[in-house]
Image (cartoon, rainbow, N blue to C red):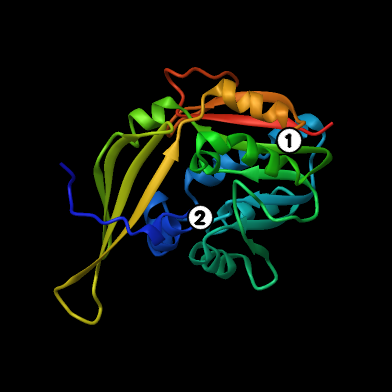
Amino acid sequence: MTLLDRTRPEEKETFAAPYDAMAPHYEAFVGSTETTRYYEWLEGLLELPAAVGVTGGRALDIGCGTGRSMLALRAAGFDAAGIDPSRGMMEIARERLGADAVLEVGGLPNLPDGPPAALVTAFNDIINCVGTSRLGEAMGSMAARVAPGGALLFDSNAPLTFKTFFGSTFARAEDDLFLVWESLGAVEDNGYRADLHAFEIDPETPGRWKRSVSHHLQHLHPHAAIVAAIEAAGLELVLVQGQRDSGPRDHHFDEEIHSKRIYLARRP
């Protein structure tokens, strides 16, 4: 039995739809302040491309969302552009990054054509939003945007995340906002569903709350499948690291303790 009644209109089942609905509440859900450990995490990740000689130049951030990772890319010395399927998320990114920010609507598994970048990034489970049957297609699309000698840096949720985060129902509250993450369990294609219910005070009707729901679907990609997709896309795998949930990043990966895998690949 689910926590709340829900509907899944067909028009909502798109890559952009969950984040269009979630956009006003996204930062409250993941942590909104500029001083969160998320920025420290990004700073650490953006030191990794130096291992293949990539320390600056053009960067393309796939799934740029509200622009926080683009801020980190700028701080690391990159000329960052962003692409995301959600116009709602990119409106927030535009406010954060300024009118001159290069932002484009699009997403995996088929990115639009564009100039190659020294560094292509895809943070925060972007690859997990792609079904297993389209993993190779998505990897090839990302690789096509990597310049010769450039690098692809991305993370992928590991089995532990689907056992814990996607396997739990919990609530968070912030000021006049109440959020409920409702686990809906596993589905076909190594998929896991969850709904985010957002309740906010209705400013036009005191004492009443407005509710919106965003429907989330992610897919578990085995490590071997990701490695095979990287190689098939013409890239060379440089390293795989393990990220502990709310903890350190290790130079190895262990499915028992790490919630994410971090991948760095390069184009010869």
Q: CA distance from mark 1 to mark 2?
A: 23 Å
- Residue drawn at (62%, 65%), measured in percent from left and top? 97
Q: Amino acid at mark 1?
A: Pro
Instruction: Please identify the quadrant where the C terminus is shown.
Output: top right
Q: Residues within 10 Å of mark 2 (few under 14, many from 20)?
A: few
**Residue 128 against residue 197 in the figure, above or below:** above
- The residue to which callout 2 is attached is 34
Which percent across, then down, holds residue 181?
A: 29, 47
- The residue to which callout 1 is attached is 49
- Residue drawn at (24%, 41%), measured in percent from left and top? 169
Which percent across, then down, holds residue 253?
A: 54, 19
**Residue 164 against residue 5 in the figure, above or below:** above
Q: Amino acid at mark 2?
A: Glu
**Residue 141 against residue 17 in the figure, above or below:** above
Q: Is residue 112 left or right of residue 31?
A: right
Q: Is residue 108 left or right of residue 159?
A: right
Instruction: Please identify the quadrant where the N terminus is shown.
Output: top left
